[in-house]
Amino acid sequence: MGYFIRGRIRPETENPLNRWLLAGYKPLLLRALNNRRNTFLLALLCLLSLAWPLSRLGSDLCRR
């Protein structure tokens, strides 16, 4: 990383991209923490939605 970074490095609070990301992240995090059950159910649903595609992984080799 040191080879790619040149010049003066601005503090995190002065970086506009970092400020924008933190402004969006904090409310989203607070909402997730306040709705723990819904957040858990959404994460579980996302995990379970992978079951069928993962079970089909590599099945194209068996059809030849």
Image (cartoon, helix red, strand yellow):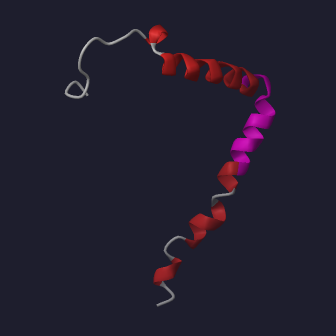
Residue found 69% across the figure and 43% down from its top: 43
Residue 46, horizontal then vertical, whole percent? 68, 50
Relative to 32, residue 26 above or below: above
Q: Is the magenta stretch mostly helix, strand or loop?
A: helix
Horizontal side of residue 5 vs 27, given as left or right: left
Which residues make up the magenta segment?
33-45
Residue 9, horizontal then vertical, whole percent? 32, 13
Q: Which of 36 and 8 is in front in this view?
A: 8
Residue placed farthest to the left in the image? 3
Residue 36 magenta-highlighted:
yes
Residue found 46% across the figure and 9% down from its top: 14
Horizontal side of residue 6 vs 13, given as left or right: left
Dividing the picture into quarters, in which one does residue 40 lie?
Answer: top right
Q: How many labels does the image show?
A: 0
Which quadrant is home to the N terminus?
top left
Residue found 69% across the figure and 55% down from its top: 48
Relative to 32, residue 46 above or below: below
Relative to 52, residue 15 above or below: above
Relative to 21, residue 55 above or below: below
Q: Nearer the viewer, residue 25 or 47?
A: 25
Residue found 49% across the figure and 85% down from its top: 62
Residue 15, horizontal then vertical, whole percent? 45, 15
Residue placed farthest to the bottom in the image? 64
